[in-house]
Amino acid sequence: MKIGHLADIHLGHRQYGLKQREDDMTNTFKATLQLIMRDDPDAILLPGDLFHSRDLRPKALEAAEKGLSVVPNDVPVLVSRGNHDENLTPREVTWLNYLHRRGHIVLLEADLENNPEVAQFGRYDADEPGEDAGFYDIETDTGTVRVFGLQWRGARTDTALEKVAKGIRETAEDHGQPDYTVLLAHFGIEDEVPALGGNVTHAELRDVREVVDYLALGHIHKCYDASGWIYNPGSSEAHSTSEARDDWNHGYYSVDLSPADDEYDGPGQLAHDVNHKHSRRRPFYTIKFDVTPYESVGELETAFREQLSDEQSVLQNYLDREEFLLGNERREPMIDLRFEGTLQFDRGSFRVDELADQTATVCDALYVQTNTSRVTTAEIQELLAELDDEEVFVDGRLQTAALEQRVFETIATESEYSNHADAVAALLGDAHRMAQDGESTDDIVDVVSESRRELFPEATSGVSLDVSEDPFAERDEGEESTAKQQTAAAPRGDAN
């Protein structure tokens, strides 16, 4: 038996305001499903964030349906809700419910409200699918694989997992014991990923491990696995310059199941062999330039042009990597242009836009993201000389983060958020770094809003959005024209 596992597709994400990036999300989703289908899977798992926005444009929904159309009807696509799939407004139907009712996916969710102690799971019925289901049995000659879904729970994930473990036991008592059990969920694991909202500890998974063979995760965009049963494939596309690093390994899992031997330590009768494979995505490429050695603007610009020229052979080899090709064609790269060091002349003469234009032309880039946050000036260095070196400098580098953190801690402590000062200060720092990296306003709002709901649930219970009665209504021609002009006029970003 074979299973595919992908996550965090984020259909509709128009990164940096570029229509091409929204198209990338669509194309990569479809291409990843096509790659998975080469392995002839019996089912496909997608634990959360199929969509990027809770209230999506019709084009994103159309992209989901077209992408899912490459999967045959006899191969179920089993989906659970992620934080980006959550609705902020009460609706009878969410977009995942819509896809479930249309038969494009099987939406799996735990009923955590009916019984305060135990999660309840209803069996999927193809004749009467309803709005969602609790579990789905995959029947093959190899055995029965039972797949459960847990929707995004944020800070309440730990208590939900206790109920889920009990609910899986009760389901086995009512419907028989499967040969292998999978749980779809959307959260991160502490000690495995950066500190983000929705993380749980390994200790909080002990009860789940007693009843689950394979924990299929989404939420963190970096590939990682743990303890031989926890697997997170990473997003199919990079959604920021920091996510585009090689060690994030964006892609999907191919899972082979076969009868277990005596050494298998899971609860089921089948064992898994898991292989991670790269998705086909647009390349991000980083160019770093140290401004320190140059006494004048002319010297700096001459040296920059020389570095761009020297960089080309490395860049072209990078673009030829299989995971970056569209068919057999190279894609225009996203360039992460990072300046660092100490300017020896007036900062006003440091023409970053012109250097970005040169980079876009020479590298044939789709977009150039500039970052000057690590650039200081000789005058600032003199002013900082009076401060404590051990605090402000580490290995000769200015620690702006340490100085900024002091400001954020002061703001948090001397405000209405003082009861959560450390968490609020950390959130301010995260939002600031996202802004420096050129992340979109919508992405920053999502992060801040999500953390606010987790830290202050009582203060956000009444939040709602004003959404059109007809979410399928197309934008008018004037709005579409304006959007095209903005995209055409925005070939780069400058995060200072």
Image (cartoon, rainbow, N blue to C red):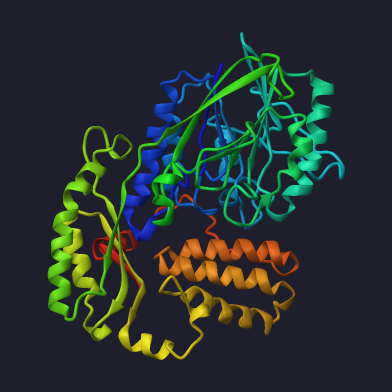
450 w.r.t. 329: above or below: below
Asked whether the viewer can see residue 448, the reply is: yes
126 w.r.t. 310: above or below: above
Quarter of the image with the N terminus in it: top right
Residue 230 position in % (x across, y down) = 63, 36
Is residue 405 toward the left or the right of residue 236 in the image?
A: right
| Location of residue 215 by image quarter | top right
Quarter of the image with the C terminus in it: bottom left
Q: Nearer the viewer, residue 339 or 448?
A: 339
Residue 485 position in % (x across, y down) = 26, 63
| Location of residue 112 by image quarter | top right
Asked whether the viewer can see residue 466, the reply is: no
Residue drawn at x 49%, y 61% is 443
407 w.r.t. 430: above or below: below
Residue 381 position in % (x across, y down) = 37, 85
Residue drawn at x 76%, y 45% is 160
Residue 50 position in % (x across, y down) = 51, 43
101 w.r.t. 1: above or below: below
Is residue 301 toward the left or the right of residue 320 in the image?
A: left
